[in-house]
Image (cartoon, helix red, strand yellow):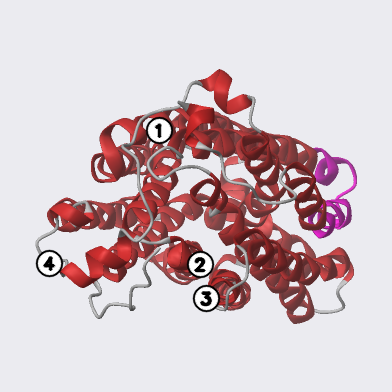
Amino acid sequence: MTEIARPRGNVRWVICGLLFAAVVLSYVDRLVLPVLKPSLQARYGWTEQGYADLAIWFQGAYGLAYVLFGRLVDRVGARIGYALAVTLWTIGHVAHVLFTSTAGMAIARVPLAIGEAGAFPAALAATGEWFPKSERALAIGIFNAGSNVGAIVTPLVVPIIAVTFGWRMAFVATGLLTVLWLVAWLGFYRRPREHARVTPAELAWIEREPAEPARPIAWRTLLSLRQTWAYMLGRFLIDPVWWTFLFWLPDFFNRQYHVKMLDFGPPLVAVYLLADIGSIGGGWLSSRLLLRGWTTGRARKTAMLVCALFALPIAFAAHAPSLWSAVLLIGLACAAHQGFSANVYALPGDLFPRGRAGSVIGLGGLSGAVGGMLMAKFAGTILARLGSYQPIFLVAACAYLVALLVIHFLVPRYTPVASAQIA
């Protein structure tokens, strides 16, 4: 391959910025309910099992829709796929205002879950279109950091809106922001060769690796490949930990340290700021190693190992002597998750031909959601019976090392799928 100098053009990074903003908004919309949970639970008599079931319904719909959207994005592309996803999740998000029971909230969570499920396959497809392999994990790490920004903004803004204007307005006000993003996305996003602002140098940089036309791969073929199972099982093992953080952290701080709704901001901001550092750092580390000449597999797995080691101290978080020591331990684990996931999410782009990874991404999302459903049921049962987060944090501590071992066992040489295997 002819060496191409890094170009001055930055349209791809503007695209990355739009993806980052979308992830921020998706996590804001996803986290409004968990932030309001202690208040709504006290007002409407929600049970722990009822809240866990709500999480299970969300994750079930999310996982199934992830597969369908992965397939759809292969057919319609990132631009239309993302627009459909945002439209669906906004409808579901605003619909929360119609209900007060956990059963009713579950009805609203389904279209929210379906739309948000479509966002990530579309974002990964856009990254595959706009970034070469050497920059892909970094770009994923950057836009994935939007989840942490969303998690920071939500506990700062939502309680103020809820106390001032009522809890329903928290859903309406945040939902309107996605409409503005949708206008910007449809107006700016095009494929690299169709974009008027892309310079020839930037286009050459983006297309320095060969791409194939986007078309779905047969399910039977996908499920016969070790690379598919490496991604699916990696997601199955690590996604439940992140779902647990999203759904239960405000409850943990309230239960363990008696933190009230208006005071959630500082500890959650600290946790997700650390997660932001991990998200960008994990992607940066493997991208840096690739630019220094490391093989793709060695770079990705080294970054995953570093992140997995940072997750281990969360095993002690349930017995932390103070709120801020617990925040530090949980924040390290969130940073570890985001750095680890930035490299796992790069796996389909690394191991499958460009334009052929959407269905793999969909299967990975389903696998992660199934793991999240099992974890939600486990968490609800443990909290109802023991009232302790200790078993939950022990699972979180071990998940990343186990995931890395599974990925290494399945793809020890990180060998890409040959086009003939999926023809």
Up the image or down, 290 lies above or below 170; here it is below
SS for tag 3? helix
Cα distance between the residues tagged 4 and 2: 38 Å
Q: Is residue 166 left or right of residue 84?
A: right
Cα distance between the residues tagged 2 and 3: 38 Å
Mark 4: few/some/many CA within 10 Å (<14, 14-19, 20+): few
Q: Is residue 219 inside the magenta stretch?
A: no
Number of disc labels: 4
The amino acid at mark 4 is Arg
SS for tag 1? helix
The amino acid at mark 3 is Leu
Label 3 sits on residue: 291
- Closer to viewer: mark 3 or mark 1: 3
- Closer to viewer: mark 1 or mark 4: 4
Residues at circles 4 and 2 in contact by the CB criterion of under 8 Å: no
Cα distance between the residues tagged 3 and 4: 26 Å
Mark 3: few/some/many CA within 10 Å (<14, 14-19, 20+): few
The amino acid at mark 2 is Pro
Label 4 sits on residue: 197
- Closer to viewer: mark 4 or mark 2: 4
Quarter that holds the N terminus: bottom left
Residue 51 is situated, as x and y percent measured from the top left of the image, at 64, 39
SS for tag 2? helix
Q: Which residues are magenta?
A: 381-398
